[in-house]
Image (cartoon, rainbow, N blue to C red):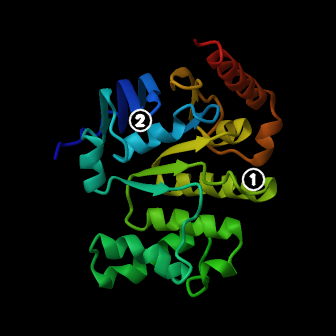
Amino acid sequence: MGTWDVTSPVIEAKDLDLTFETNDGPVHALKGVDLSVEKGEFVSFIGPSGCGKTTFLRCIAGLETPTGGALTVNGMSPDEARKSRAYGYVFQAAGLYPWRTIAGNIRLPLEIMGYPKSEHAERVDKVMSLVDLKGFGKKFPWQLSGGMQQRASIARALAFDADILLMDEPFGALDEIVRDHLNEQLLELWARTEKTIAFVTHSIPEAVYLSTKIVVMSPRPGRITDVIESPLPRERPLDIRDTQQFLDVAHRVREGLREGHSYD
């Protein structure tokens, strides 16, 4: 495996392309993507459905193979990074096994990865505290709300303490009040763990509220139309969304989305 220089980007894409071959001809999912993500950043990807946001996340995770350009994660290939347990992945749906308790679901990657059984309980307790689920370990998924299930999914991704957290629209199916609460909790979690987070969303307010960097993407083939370095402070109460500074960033995101539709 390659070695990782801590001064180099955690995630780096250079002229990245991905084309899927289908029965109806080639589908150009990503084209000419250039991006650097530094350690400890919170980067959101926003764009219309089908623009390649999730595809790019899956490339980072080594779940899709680019057809052109270069991509490194911790200075390694995505496949090497996956094998070295460089990231945790949170999907759109919580994906918890209904026959396992919450603690059992969170423990699953530790079992798969062969962590010593003596470490399981301590790791599970630690991440359940991080996501404010302490005391719910013996419950089953159906006994928890949607928001609590998604927090359990985040805890599962944190169980083996990877430096990178990849999150594919984890709060998209939740109502606005629950989503706001989980956004606040996610920022607190990020501040405590100092992980690098790559986050896919369709929500402009969510992208602006959470991120240190917002990556705006165009319709397929997915290109980056703008990369916005957030001027907002790292500590962000919800009411920061009413400030002019927040609204200015949201306006720039909206302009980037509009510009994306002008591509041929």
Residue 145 picture location, percent across and down: 71, 72
Q: Is residue 48 above or below residue 82?
A: above
Q: Quadrant of residue 208?
A: top right
At which x and y percent is residue 35?
43, 27
Front residue (pair 247, 233)? 247
Q: Residues within 10 Å of mark 1 (few under 14, many from 20)?
A: some
The residue wearing badge 2 is 38
Against 234, residue 104 (above or below) is below
Q: Amino acid at mark 2?
A: Glu
| Label 2 element class | loop
The image quarter containing residue 203 is top right
**221 or 207, nearer to the observer:** 221
Q: Residue at x 55, y 52 (%)?
A: 191
What residue does disc 1 label? 180
Q: CA distance from mark 1 to mark 2?
A: 26 Å
Task: Please give the label number shown on residue 34.
Answer: none
Dot 1 and dot 2 residues touching (CB under 8 Å): no
Mark 1 or 2 closer to N-term?
2
Q: Quadrant of the C terminus?
A: top right
Q: Nearer the viewer, mark 1 or mark 2?
A: 1
Indicate the quadrant where residue 261 lies: top right
Q: Amino acid under label 1?
A: Asp
Which residue appears at 48% of the width and 67% of the height? 156
